[in-house]
Image: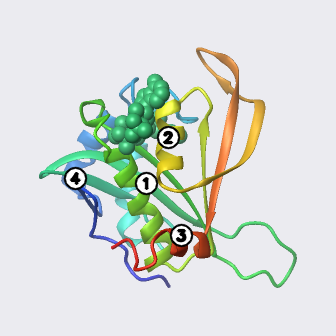
Amino acid sequence: MFPAPWPARSGALVLRDPRPDELDGLAVLRNDPAVNRFMLRTHVEPEEFRREWSTVPGSDTDFSCVAEHGGRTVGLGFLDVLDGLGQPGMPRGTQGRIGYVLDPSAWGRGLGTDLARGLLSAAFDVLGLRRVTASCNADNPASVRVLEKAGMRREQHGVQDSWHAELGWVDGYEYALLAPEWAALHPTGAR
Ligand SMILES: CC(C)(COP(=O)(O)OP(=O)(O)OC[C@H]1O[C@@H](n2cnc3c(N)ncnc32)[C@H](O)[C@@H]1OP(=O)(O)O)[C@@H](O)C(=O)NCCC(=O)NCCS
């Protein structure tokens, strides 16, 4: 059982659990074509979105959150706890995977980086995870920058490893960070 990471401040954002009354609005944001252009899962049926996000606050492995800026909901952060790969005896639930989407009206002000850092801080400083990964498309320079500004290391460049509906076969990047690397970046903790 992990401690609850939210609510938390990260830079200019407050990260918190989703509320049932805002899930329909968040589904509209998630389905904005500008927002999901580089998501592997593009359209998400609103009912499915509501079902998935309403279970988040009680989940043992899904610590996704809503991002608020100045009292306005501007985005979603994804944080899942995973087992990773290993032989029998491997400790379970030591890895995290993060992702993020922001309303286009909030882009270009450092909020994506605040969101990624908040997810990393939750993963390492609160959940105590060992390793966190994230992936993005090489054609999505804003996301590449966000991961690099947050301190993540590029571990893999997959040449034409992903299908993009509009661009065809495109390159993907895989990023990772280990707990000691996070601690070295934030010696007194990010919070
Ligand atoms: C990715 C996303 C969260 C970035 O949010 P943001 O608030 O604009 O991010 P930040 O302002 O913290 O940083 C963006 C960086 O990308 C850079 N950038 C943006 N567009 C760029 C482009 N076309 N080419 C090069 N750099 C670009 C910005 O200049 C900035 O870098 P800098 O601080 O060094 O100048 C936002 O664009 C988004 O929600 N996109 C849609 C969803 C998505 O693609 N999610 C990621 C899936 S892997």
Local crowd size for mark 3, using a 10 Å CA cut-off: few (<14), some (14–19), many (≥20): many
**Residue 33 in view of the camera:** yes
User: Disc 3 designates what residue?
Assistant: 182
Q: Is residue 171 above or below residue 85?
A: above
Q: Earlier in the sequence, mark 3 or mark 1?
A: 1
Q: Mark 1: which amino acid?
A: Ala
Ligand 1, seen in the image, is in the quarter at top left
Q: Earlier in the sequence, mark 1 or mark 2?
A: 1
Question: In the displayed structure, does residue 167 sit left or right of residue 43?
Answer: right
Q: Mark 3: which amino acid?
A: Trp
Q: Mark 4: which amino acid?
A: Glu
> What separation in Å lies between label 1 and label 2 (alpha carbons)?
11 Å
User: Disc 2 designates what residue?
Assistant: 145
> What separation in Å lies between label 3 and label 4 (alpha carbons)?
24 Å
Q: Position of residue 31 (x, y in %)?
A: 38, 31
Local crowd size for mark 4, using a 10 Å CA cut-off: few (<14), some (14–19), many (≥20): some
Depth check, mark 3 against mark 4: the one in front is 3
Q: Earlier in the sequence, mark 3 or mark 4?
A: 4
Queried on whether the Cβ of the residue with tag 1 lies below 8 angstroms from ligand 1, the answer reads yes
Depth check, mark 3 against mark 1: the one in front is 3
Q: At 53% across and 30% down in the image, what residue appears?
A: 140
SS label for mark 1: helix
Q: Position of residue 37 (x, y in %)?
A: 48, 26
> What separation in Å lies between label 3 and label 1 (alpha carbons)?
12 Å
Question: In the displayed structure, does residue 51 sit left or right of residue 178?
Answer: left
The label shown at residue 15 is: none
Q: Mark 2: which amino acid?
A: Arg
The label shown at residue 116 is: 1
